[in-house]
Amino acid sequence: MPRRSRRLVLTGSITGAAVVALDGTVLTVAQPSLRHDLGATFAQVQWTSTAYLIAVTSLLVFAGRLGDRYGQRQVFAVGALGFGAASAAVGCAPSIGWVIALRAVQGVFGALLQPATLGLLRAAYPADRIARPIAARTAVIGLAAAAGPVLGGALTSQLGWRAVLFLGVVPAVAVGLLALAVRLPAPPPTARPGLDLPGAALLALTLAGLVHTLTSLPHPGPVAPVLTLLAALLLLRHERSAAHPLLPAALLRSAPTAPALAILTAASACMFGTLYLVTYLLQDALGLSALDGGLRGLPLALAMIGAAPAGAALMRRHGPRRTAAPGLLLIALGALLLSRLAPGTSWWGSTPGFLLLGAGFGAVMVTGTAVVVRRAAVADAGIAGGLQQTAMNLGPALGIAVGTTLTALGLSPGGTVLALAGTAAAALLLTRSLPAD
């Protein structure tokens, strides 16, 4: 592929990933204003996030397969343009019910967009050169995470919550149109995988039920867990006999793939669960405002930006195993330090924990993603991207669910963060299954 086309692919991939990352962070900051303006309850506001999360997580793998069959560029363009249009529609929503429904629609287009950001990279770059573009994508996600709370707070304060929804419209539409202008080799008809619609439906039910159960903890009720288990069992039975299974056995049986996905899930669970609880520690224990608390967390995003390219360089020199293990250790140590936040803790006192957490997560995210995507054939690049994105969506839901449940059972936020640190430390055992070089 010409160098110019590769640069356009990289630009589109990282911009698409950044738009999705920015959308989540800015909307979180705007939720209190949204609740007041629309007269919504806390439960309704929570569903503005839950509806999106269920929609996007349940469809990521199937969306990845659509990219493998019909072309990553086309699916990416539809996802980006639809995501931009849905964002604008949410910003114009007249009621909380419309916001929730349109957030679910936005999640559908987000599911089309996210796996394709990785599928495009796998199609454009050889397997042995993919770590660097993945590192650039990860660094930009970190930048979006850093900018999101600041931009969201400023826009909400000056223009209201609707303004934050329009923030990503122009970049999403622009990158969707850019994707239509780039030419990638189309998969030959003989190499296009079949669509396993029953498997896709069962996987969607399984993941939707799992996310709903996690977001409902500590009181999920009996229906969702039972239906989730039933759908999972039916999925396993179906995939064993399907002529064109949704989850390709060659990819899943690749020795490093499952451990890499588990490591990504554990790392994101620890990080996002920790951030969820630390937000309360900063505001309740330290008495900081929402803006001051957000500024305290900036070192995490900056460390993540720096750790992404460093992680790619370390992986090339020392291999995924010896890069992921120190990264997980840094995550655990960062969470350990943040669990000790107390009244009187200064900015300098909290910064080391955030730095370690961000540095570790940046290195682990690059390493785990590269292992999953690099091991996939080009024909399965979308599925690999869908699996990676599923892990990155389930991890935060799991971490927040653990935090909510343990604090509801009476454990202090600091003690719960300590338990989450144990999750990252336990994942160190999985690094033995990653490639040594």
Image (tube, grey):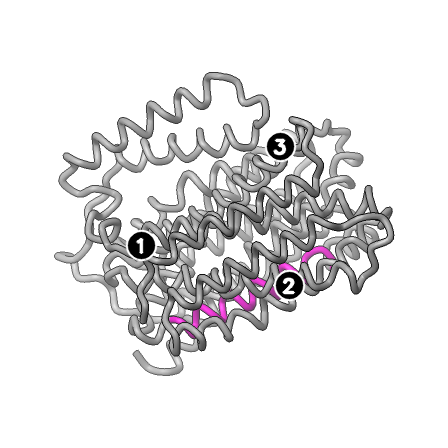
Magenta stretch bounds:
131-150
Residue to which mark 3 is pinned: 406
Amino acid type for the residue under numbered disc 2: Ala
Cα distance, mark 1 to mark 2? Answer: 27 Å
Residue drawn 51% across the image and 40% down it: 105
Q: Secondary structure at mark 3?
A: helix
Where's the C terminus, which quadrant?
bottom left
**Secondary structure, magenta segment, majority class:** helix
Give the image quarter of residue 170: bottom right
Residue to which mark 1 is pinned: 257
Instruction: Say whether residue 276 is left or right of residue 194.
Output: right
Amino acid type for the residue under numbered disc 3: Leu
Q: Are marks 1 and 3 in contact (CB under 8 Å)?
A: no
Q: Position of residue 43 (x, y in %)?
A: 67, 27
Instruction: Say whether residue 351 is left or right of residue 270.
Output: right
Residue to which mark 2 is pinned: 301
Q: Are marks 3 and 2 in contact (CB under 8 Å)?
A: no
Where's the N terminus, which quadrant?
bottom left
Query: How many residues crowd around disc 3 within 10 Å: few (fewer than 14), some, or many (20 or more)?
Result: some
Q: Position of residue 102 (x, y in %)?
A: 57, 38
Which one is in front in this view, the residue at disc 1 or the one at disc 3?
A: 3
Cα distance, mark 1 to mark 3? Answer: 30 Å
- Is residue 330 rendered magenta in the image? no
Q: Residue furthest top?
A: 222
Sequence-first disc among 3 and 2: 2
Q: Nearer the viewer, residue 241 or 98?
A: 241
Residue drawn 55% across the image and 46% down it: 86
Instruction: Say whether residue 55 is left or right of residue 350.
Output: left
Q: Position of residue 15 (x, y in %)?
A: 52, 65
Residue drawn 32% across the image and 31% down it: 202
- Is residue 137 rendered magenta in the image? yes
